[in-house]
């Protein structure tokens, strides 16, 4: 079956474009949800930095620093320096959205402290994923240029597709890591009384919206891999 009509790649329309639209929607949704619950202030008046410290203390984690970083939703935990960095709208904010995000990042710190297997695996495969993503398309293009060499051409193409596959593996490993960090965050928020029942709903919705961005990223990686397999995986059969 031809997938190109008049130079137009229909595999992109069928496989990639829906995931791209999902990613755009997920990104817009997390931003709108964060803005909405940024207006809901917590009764206890704890800031995002305070809340993250409470989560760490509740889990017996004492050696993690909490710092401010500029930007919008640039929050992250850096395992190399053992630092939680919280953005402008999170570090000093008392909103339920900010507290949810800050506690989520503290959840990542707790994962490392407790040697949570998926996050260790994700950290281990990051170099391989970065290496594979850089090599994938050059290898596929090299295979296409060597199309006259038969099996050697296919070797480079399939090797390139395999390298791209590491991106999907990384995304699949990321999903349980992010979901678990949110569960840890919400459990700590409830156990330590950082937020009331009503306020916890705001934090939960913010974290749920953020989780959808990881689901969309996984779907996009899967779609791209399927597209490569559709375009190049049947080259031998098409020559028969």
Image (cartoon, grey):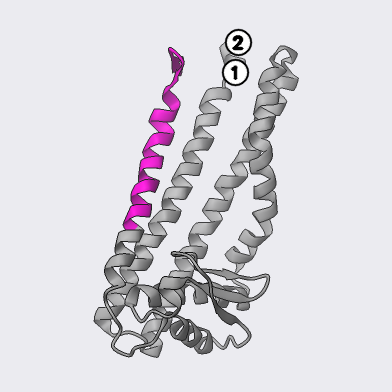
Query: Is residue 183 among what the camera can see?
Result: no
- Is residue 34 in the magenta section? no
Q: Is residue 197 left or right of residue 226?
A: left
Q: Mark 2 — residue? A: 239
Residue 202, image x, y percentages:
29, 73
Q: Quadrant of residue 37?
A: bottom left
Q: Is residue 198 left or right of residue 182?
A: left
**From this viewpoint, which residue is outermost toward the top?**
240
Seen at 61% across and 59% down, the residue is 122
Vertical placement of residue 236 versus 210, above or below: above
Vertical placement of residue 138 versus 102, above or below: above
Residue 47, image x, y percentages:
41, 83
Q: Which mark is residue 176?
A: none
Q: Are marks 1 and 2 in contact (CB under 8 Å)?
A: yes
Structural crowding at the residue carrying mark 2, measured as other residues with C-alpha within 10 Å and reported as few (<14), some (14–19) or many (≥20): few
Q: Quadrant of residue 159?
A: top right
Residue 211 versus residue 84: which sits nearer the camera? 84
- Is residue 21 in the magenta section? yes
Vertical placement of residue 233 versus 59, above or below: above
Seen at 58% across and 24% down, the residue is 232
* Secondary element at image label 2: helix
Q: Mark 1 — residue? A: 235
Residue 48 versus residue 220: which sits nearer the camera? 48
| Majority secondary structure in the magenta region | helix
Query: Is residue 169 among what the camera can see?
Result: yes
Q: Is residue 190 left or right of residue 122?
A: left
Location of the C terminus by quadrant is top right
Give the magenta range: 1-29
Location of the N terminus by quadrant is top left
Residue 237 versus residue 83: which sits nearer the camera? 83
**From this viewpoint, which residue is outermost toward the left?**
198
Seen at 30% across and 63% down, the residue is 33
């Amino acid at each position: 079956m031809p997938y190109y009509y008049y130079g137009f790649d229909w595999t992109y329309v069928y496989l990639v474009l829906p995931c791209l639209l999902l990613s755009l929607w997920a990104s817009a949704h997390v931003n709108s949800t964060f803005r909405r619950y940024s207006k809901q202030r917590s009764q206890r008046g704890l800031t995002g930095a305070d809340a993250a410290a409470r989560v760490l203390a509740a889990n017996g984690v004492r050696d993690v620093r909490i710092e401010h970083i500029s930007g919008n939703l640039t929050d992250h935990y850096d395992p190399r320096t053992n630092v939680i960095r919280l953005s402008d709208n999170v570090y000093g904010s008392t909103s339920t959205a900010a507290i949810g995000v800050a506690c989520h990042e503290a959840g990542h710190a707790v994962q490392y402290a407790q040697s949570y297997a998926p996050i260790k695996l994700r950290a281990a495969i990051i170099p391989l994923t970065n290496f594979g993503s850089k090599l994938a398309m050059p290898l596929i293009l090299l295979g296409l240029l060597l199309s006259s060499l038969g099996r050697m051409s296919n070797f480079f193409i399939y090797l390139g597709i395999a390298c791209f596959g590491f991106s999907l593996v990384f995304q699949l490993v990321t999903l349980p890591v992010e979901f678990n960090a949110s569960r840890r965050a919400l459990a700590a928020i409830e156990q330590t009384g950082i937020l009331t029942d009503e306020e916890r709903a705001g934090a939960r919705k913010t974290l749920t919206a953020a989780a959808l961005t990881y689901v969309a990223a996984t779907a996009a990686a899967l779609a791209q891999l399927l597209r490569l397999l559709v375009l190049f995986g049947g080259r031998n059969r098409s020559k028969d």
